[in-house]
Amino acid sequence: MFCTVNRGSVIQFSVAFLACLTELTGCMFLAWTSPVVGILMTEHTVLKSGSLTEDQVSFMVSLLYYGQIAGALLGGWLVNVIGRKRVILASVIPQLVSSALTILAQIPLMLYTAKVLTGLSLGIVIVVVPIFTAEISGKKLRTTINNLFGININIGIFLGKILTEKFGYYAVPIAIITITIIFVGLFVLIPDSPEYLVYRSRFEDAESSLKFYRGVKSDDPLPRACIQELEEMKTILNHRSQQTSVTIKDFTSGSTILTLFITFMITSNMNFTGNRITTSFTDTILESSGILMDISLIEMIISLVLIFMSILVMCCVCWLGVRFSMICFYVISFVSLSGAAVQFYMVEHNMFVPKWPFITSISLAIVIPATGVINPSLPIPALLLPMKIKGCILGIFNVANLILAFFMVQTYFTVVQSFGHSNLMFSFGCWCVLGALFTFYILPEVSNKSYSELCYELEWKAQKIFRIFNY
């Protein structure tokens, strides 16, 4: 049994990391944009049509959001129609075409199309991959494995920046094509998640899939623990009427309403902790101090720190649980963002600002929310939402947040001119206080719990909070 458990853990980690490579390659292309813009806007541009204007660059960047919105809706719909595995495999097609267009680009239209396709791929992945990794993982490893998604985001951003800085325009798209070909060659060999196969009433395939992910040899009988896990999946699907068509009744039970609220709070973290703003405008934020510094070097160091911090957060989640870890990191995020607000207040009122305290406070304001709050929270909706509505709800909530993110990015300079960086950072800090209270009072502990245990806890919390009990 000891060998079986270890074998299963290795398989789960390996497959989850493999699935997360789709996010890694998308984030590589995302990070590629920032250093490449400097090339595309000069006479050294690779485009035969000439250098890009600021308006063209701004339009190109905004197209990514349009693609992500379409991808989130598409992924949310397809995830229950053709399965997790097939959707993840399909998501790499637009990324491959995007990379090829980037290499062959001669006119701006080709880069515009590449951006839309990358956004489409990322939109699909951010909905489907957390669902897939949650469903293949055993309850003891589930929350730890799901943090691989956030780690791969940060690795992708770092690789995108370092490859472009060191090897130029073509390095990232060539690397993406290479990684994607390897990914497809390996991913086609693995089965879909057992939970999806049970949902489709393919019970023999579900049993084979569960054997694979729990490290049981195909010729061996299914161990008692795996039999119980499989039966639990069937029971939960019947218990929450998962195999009937979606109706309004699916959204009216107390536990589902509570889960929808939790999903709203979790998916909003990306915007309201300031992550999208601080990562999109890192160079602008640093330049606003007026302090002479090597911004490219500092951005690279921040990217590297994000990776190490992501690994540290994964260890904290493993040791302390998701709930306690998130409360701690919400509080630390508030302190970090408040510190950044104080530094910006000093800049805005022409006070003397020491170089390294400013850089440190801004770096912490970027790193702590991105790794300590967002990474452990990303997989939570996939763990709590009922199977039938999981894909569509994640798709809708992600679309809503992407639309909000688009307007936040577009109005960033106007907001900063009107209210200053100090008020902006403090408002992000206030969200972290709200998030800590929400986590303490409402969010259930998801570590080391089966889906049925989470369902019962949600029902208990819903009864306590909403005073309704429909089961």
Image (cartoon, helix red, strand yellow):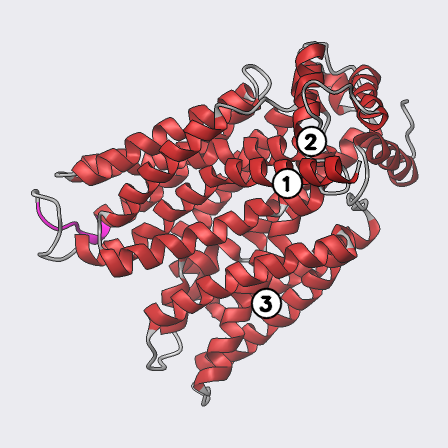
Disc 3 + disc 1, Cβ < 8 Å = no
Answer few, some or many: residues within 10 Å of disc 3's Cα (few below 14, many 20 plus, some between 14 and 19). Answer: many
Disc 1 + disc 2, Cβ < 8 Å = yes
Sequence order check: which comes first, mark 2 or mark 3?
2
For the stretch drawn in magenta, the main secondary structure is loop
- Looking at the rendered structure, the kind of residue marked 3 is Phe
Res. 349 visible in picture: no
Q: Position of residue 346 (x, y in %)?
A: 49, 83
The kind of secondary structure element at disc 2 is loop
The mark closer to the camera, 2 or 3, is 2
Q: Nearer the viewer, residue 213 or 232?
A: 213
- Looking at the rendered structure, the kind of residue marked 2 is Gly
Q: Position of residue 2 (x, y in %)?
A: 78, 40
- Find the distance from the CA under tag 1 to the CA under tag 2: 8 Å
- Looking at the rendered structure, the kind of residue marked 1 is Val
As drawn, the label of residue 448 is: none
The residue where tag 2 is placed is 215
The residue where tag 1 is placed is 10
Answer few, some or many: residues within 10 Å of disc 1's Cα (few below 14, many 20 plus, some between 14 and 19). Answer: some
The residue where tag 3 is placed is 426
For the magenta stretch, what is the residue range?
50-55
Q: Nearer the viewer, residue 17 or 276?
A: 17
The mark closer to the camera, 3 or 1, is 1
Res. 148 visible in picture: yes
Q: Position of residue 456 (x, y in %)?
A: 88, 32
Disc 2 + disc 3, Cβ < 8 Å = no
The kind of secondary structure element at disc 1 is helix
Tell me the residue at 66%/59% (across/down).
432
Tell me the residue at 63%/43% (across/down).
146
Q: Position of residue 119 (x, y in %)?
A: 39, 36
33 horizontally vs 353: left or right: left
